[in-house]
Image: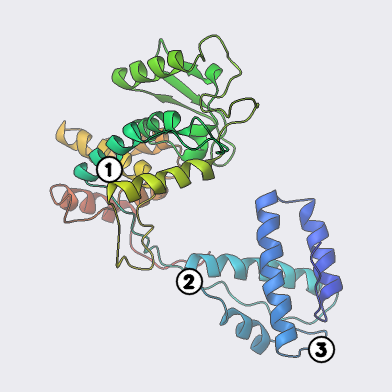
């Protein structure tokens, strides 16, 4: 466990010991990082009293940097720790969580950029012999097609095993998704055929426990970080650079393929005459979202690229997602 040096170091260790047994590994990791920052702050201001007043708590919050949502998450962790201290009879001030505005704007690849991305993915040379993922130059074109054609997350994609695929019905069962949920994803016939030919070429047919995107001579799949790194290389070779983006834009990345799938699915339904309020709930289920509000974030887009449906979707979301400030 990390070394804490403030007056509250024993309480921090006790709190983290309790949290380690009751929360996920990722949540526990966030607890450690946040309380390390708080511990350092207490030492930097020379705080030696077994109390936390408003000036001290707010002073630490004002040192935090990053996106508003990230800061709010750190304050939530501090609040849990302060509540823990209160149970010890220690006098504390528990601050409110800063209000968060949903100002995230995804990057949407143009059709020309997508064409360049797939061309480079299909023609990239093999990686050098010392690579941890020697087959990634063959795997990446299929990974990109699944993400673009089915709107899957990268973690979901690399976790697929052969037993999760029904090539006859054109279905993929995603067993390891966000929130520990499962869902079944239908594929277009063309994508199903491409996936079948990939599995045949990779010698995966008849091996139900094999990862579709596995690492040779191991029982592991390539990690999401490996695919992300390869995609960054593809973007560079494709000449796709996003200078001058605002602080809340994600920029070009693998996850953007999921965003563009969501938008193009919506646009296709709109062109077919499907009512928007009928299409969006189905899209939300397909993407594995917990709510329509979560899907709304996936349907933000650059108005210069897609002006044709901006007004119609804007009217729809204004009715069900009013613009409000909220406190998490």
Name which of mark 3 and mark 1 comes first in the sequence: 3
For residue 156, above or below residue 86: above
Label 1: element kind: helix
Question: Could you say where residue 205 lies in the image, as x and y percent from the top left?
Answer: 50, 11
| In contact (CB < 8 Å): disc 3 and disc 2 | no
From the viewer's side, name the closer residue of 189 and 99. 189
Name which of mark 3 and mark 2 comes first in the sequence: 3
Q: Mark 1 sits on what residue?
A: 263
Question: In the rendering, which numbered label is found on residue 190?
Answer: none
For residue 246, above or below residue 252: below
Residue drawn at (39%, 39%) of the image: 284
Name which quarter of the figure residue 259 lies in.
top left
Q: Mark 3 sits on what residue?
A: 48
Residue drawn at (40%, 12%) of the image: 169
Question: Could you say where residue 142 lies in the image, as x and y percent from the top left?
Answer: 40, 28
Q: Mark 2 sits on what residue?
A: 99
Name which of mark 1 and mark 2 comes first in the sequence: 2
State whether residue 222 appears in this view. Answer: yes
For residue 273, above or below residue 112: above
Residue drawn at (16%, 47%) of the image: 309
Q: In this view, does 318 lie to the left or right of 311?
A: right
Q: Distance between the residues labelled 3 and 1?
A: 54 Å
Residue drawn at (63%, 81%) of the image: 60
Q: Distance between the residues labelled 1 and 2?
A: 28 Å
Residue at the left extreme of this rendering: 308
From the viewer's side, name the closer residue of 32 and 99. 32
Name which quarter of the figure residue 33 lies in.
bottom right
């Amino acid at each position: 466990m990390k070394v804490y040096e403030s007056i509250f170091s024993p309480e921090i260790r006790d709190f983290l010991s309790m949290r380690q047994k009751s929360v996920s590994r990722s949540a526990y990791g966030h607890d450690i990082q946040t309380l390390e920052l708080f511990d350092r702050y207490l030492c930097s201001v020379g705080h030696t009293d077994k109390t936390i007043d408003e000036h001290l708590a707010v002073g630490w919050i004002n040192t935090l940097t990053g996106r508003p949502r990230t800061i709010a998450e750190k304050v939530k962790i501090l609040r849990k720790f302060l509540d823990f201290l209160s149970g010890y009879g220690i006098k504390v001030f528990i601050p409110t969580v800063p209000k968060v505005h949903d100002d995230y704007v995804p990057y949407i690849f143009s059709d020309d950029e997508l064409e360049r991305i797939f061309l480079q993915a299909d023609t990239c040379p093999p990686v050098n012999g010392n690579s941890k993922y020697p087959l990634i130059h063959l795997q990446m074109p299929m990974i990109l097609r699944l993400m673009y054609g089915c709107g899957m997350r990268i973690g979901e994609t690399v976790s697929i095993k052969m037993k999760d695929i029904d090539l006859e019905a054109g279905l993929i069962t995603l067993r390891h998704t966000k929130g520990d949920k499962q869902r079944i994803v239908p594929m277009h016939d063309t994508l199903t055929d491409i996936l079948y030919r990939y599995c045949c070429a990779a010698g995966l047919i008849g091996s139900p426990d094999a990862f579709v995107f596995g690492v040779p001579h191991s029982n592991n799949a390539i990690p999401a970080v490996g695919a992300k790194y390869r995609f960054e290389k593809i973007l560079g070779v494709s000449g796709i650079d996003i200078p001058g983006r605002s602080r809340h834009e994600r920029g070009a990345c693998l996850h953007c393929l999921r965003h563009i799938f969501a938008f193009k699915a919506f646009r296709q339904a709109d062109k077919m005459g499907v009512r928007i309020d009928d299409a969006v709930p189905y899209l939300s289920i397909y993407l594995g979202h917990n709510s329509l509000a979560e899907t709304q974030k996936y349907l933000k887009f650059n108005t210069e690229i897609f002006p044709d449906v901006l007004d119609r979707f804007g009217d729809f979301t204004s009715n069900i997602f009013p613009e409000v400030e909220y406190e998490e």
